[in-house]
Image (spheres, rainbow, N blue to C red):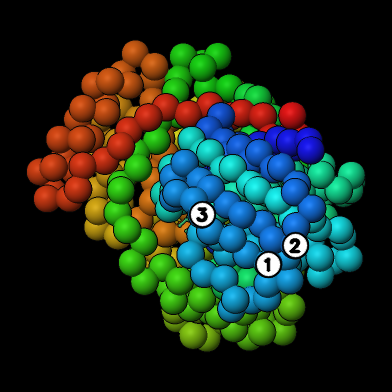
Amino acid sequence: MNTFVAQAPGRINLIGEHTDYNLGFSMPIALEERTTVRFSPDGSDRITLRSNEKGGGISFALTARPGDVDGWSAYPAGVVWALAGSGHPVVGGTMEVSSGVPIGAGLSSSAALECAVLLAMNAATDTNLDRIDVARIAQRGENDFVGAPTGLMDQLASLHGEVDRALLIDFDDSSVRPVVFDPAANGLALLVVNSNAAHQHSTGEYASRRESCTRAAHALGLGSLRRAQGVEGVLDRIEDEVDRRRARHILTENQRVLDCAAAMSAGDFRRVGDLMIRSHASMRDDFEITTPHIDLIAESLVEHGALGARMTGGGFGGCVISVVPVADVSAVSDAVTRDIADGGFPAPTVFTARAGAGASVK
Ligand code: ADP
Ligand code: MG
């Protein structure tokens, strides 16, 4: 029988954190690093998995339901469940997964895996879906089967990625607009510092931030904080001090995303850097999703010559991104690595990244 091969990239969110479930804006890039799934249907009613990262020999029934499967196979099983639940065909076979996306680093190895599995299955069953449907089905698998309450950004970024383009996403209508993102043309590099810190407590903290945003919107009599965007004096009407700061992060972050898209289009990376610094401060002070370890990395990057730096991803660990002159990349990397060691934190992994192409079937 045939083998169907699909690949999907991880992503870095350049700016716009926790805005997706508030129907706001964010601006990710797809990474060059990607996950590949080779799917060989065999006429059975099970999927058997093997991963270069996690080993093999695991299998699940096509009829598996939430709670039936755990560990990493819940991601492929969730996709199969969500596909079937949406009325699309699914078939049994073996899936070989190989990936260059760091796992659990906030670079969305999860969406890369989901999208690659979904596209490989669709190729095998000759099913053609719009990217938005693919994104929503993959998200449903992650939310309702794996049990991770994540927004739609990761899947949209993985599916829509373009070389040297960032993706301005408006979650109000799920539209995606490519924006030129080519730091190299300006003598700059996107430098990523993976803190290698485990995301402790991140699920509970994520849920509590989400609840704060929902409460803030309700306090304003609105269905979503998006409806408060640009409304004069709106924050003063939120009585609860904590919820008010959470909402202030969302509203100011949305504006920073739009400003950043304009600055990138104009090739104004000083302004991009400045917006990154402000975004980090907002995540640290208003949304309170950074950690001393992450703050140290962001401060050290700027101190040693980055135009700007900010944590990317849901928070409490993961990666810090920065824009650094190409000529300074190795000096900045060394200086940050030293500062992290002096702070008593685990050694980081430092690398440069570029905006890469989106998911595809080979
Ligand atoms: P992130 O998406 O930031 O990398 P998540 O916790 O959302 O972190 O997803 C990571 C999980 O996704 C892993 O723990 C594993 O269960 C699954 N996963 C991702 N990529 C792979 C892979 N190549 N092989 C096996 N499992 C993977
Ligand atoms: Mg993830």
Is 55 drawn above or below residue 101 in the view shown? Answer: below
Q: Is residue 182 left or right of residue 329?
A: right
**Inter-mark Cα distance, 2 to 1:** 6 Å
- Cα–Cα span, label 3 and label 1: 14 Å
> Which structural element holds mark 3?
strand
Residue 332, given in percent of the width and then of the height, sits at 26, 26
Q: Residue at x 57, y 71 (%)?
A: 69
* Quarter in which the N terminus is drawn: top right
> Mark 3 packing: few (<14 Cα in 10 Å), some, or many (20+)?
few
Query: Mark 3 vs mark 2: which is more N-terminal?
Result: 2
| Nearer to the camera, 15 or 138 | 138
In the picture of the structure, the residue carrying the numbered disc 2 is 45
Counting from the top left corner in percent of width and height, residue 165 is at 66, 29
Q: Is residue 29 visible?
A: no
Image quadrant in which the C terminus is located: top right
Residue annotated with mark 1: 61
Residue 143 picture location, percent across and down: 63, 69
Q: Which residue is mark 3?
A: 57
Q: Is residue 218 above or below residue 209?
A: below
Q: CA distance from mark 3 to mark 2?
A: 16 Å
CB under 8 Å between discs 2 and 1: yes
